[in-house]
Image: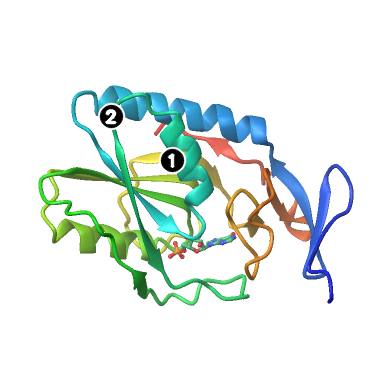
Amino acid sequence: MEATFLVHDEQTVIIRGERFRKYLTAETIRSRTEEMGARISEEYAGKKPILIGVLNGAFMFLADLMRAIDIDCEVDFLKLSSYGAAKISSGEVKELKRIDADIEDRHVIVVEDIVDTGLSMDYLMSQLQTKNPASLKSATLLHKFEATTVDVQLDYIGFRIRNLFVVGYGLDYGQVGRNLPEIYILEDQMGPGTEPERVSK
Ligand code: IMP
């Protein structure tokens, strides 16, 4: 069987024949996730929020974010259609799995790994709003701010990044690379001004 994933060295992995370089270390992701969790704990004290993770990509971030929240909270998942093996968003959103929880009168936080065009998050926010939650917010580890084409509501953002293709920490390239504990970008896209930016949100 042909290998689709190869750890080349400390800084590089090769996925489907393309070279990716380390971009966000596990430690950087952890410290930012802890800050986000602390803020959510503070803002939702006494409220028991329900975190809704968007499968597949958000499972890893959601697991760490939830561990960084020290108030009572619940979890559920939904799934939207993915890009397949393409690196560019098709712009079409389909719901493949719905949530099981009844979110009426609940405080809901939608958790994404990455917001790119914003179409998925925008679609989800408007879908979930029809179920009459007590409040509805969104959290994403990464926001490709230059790629976002809709005016999507983003309440908690881990890092703002340029329009770069990333893999690892739940994010995939054609289903490969999700298990990498750190986040990598395409080597060809590296350059000045591509560093991730921590935002105050
Ligand atoms: P959007 O609807 O264009 O905002 O796309 C959101 C979804 O696209 C995310 O949940 C990811 O699954 C996927 N995605 C967007 N950018 C990337 C990327 O750079 N690497 C891997 N998946 C991505």
The percent position of residue 150, horizontal first and vertical second, equals 35, 62
Residue 192 in sight in this render: no
Residue 171 in sight in this render: yes
Quadrant of residue 68 within the rendered picture: top left
The percent position of residue 77, horizontal first and vertical second, equals 36, 56
Q: Which residue position is annotated with label 1?
A: 157
Badge 2 residue CB within 8 Å of ligand 1: no
Give the position of the N terminus as an image quadrant: bottom right
Name the one closer to the observer, 1 or 61.
1
Mark 1 Cα-neighbour bin, 10 Å: few <14, some 14–19, many ≥20: many
Quadrant of residue 187 within the rendered picture: bottom right
The amino acid pointed to by label 1 is Ile
Q: Earlier in the sequence, mark 1 or mark 2?
A: 2
Whether 161 is drawn above or below 99: the answer is: above
- For image coordinates 59% across by 35% down, the residue present is 29
Quadrant of residue 65 within the rendered picture: top left
Number of marks in the rendered image: 2
Whether 140 is drawn above or below 71: the answer is: below
What is the distance, in whole Å, between disc 1 and disc 2 at their CAs?
Answer: 22 Å
- For image coordinates 49% across by 27% down, the residue present is 34
The amino acid pointed to by label 2 is Asp
**SS of the residue under disc 2:** loop
- For image coordinates 11% across by 51% down, the residue present is 104
Question: Mark 1 against mark 2, which lies toward the viewer?
Answer: 2
Is 18 on the left-hand or right-hand side of 141?
Answer: right
Q: Which residue position is annotated with label 2?
A: 72
Is 159 on the left-hand or right-hand side of 178?
Answer: left
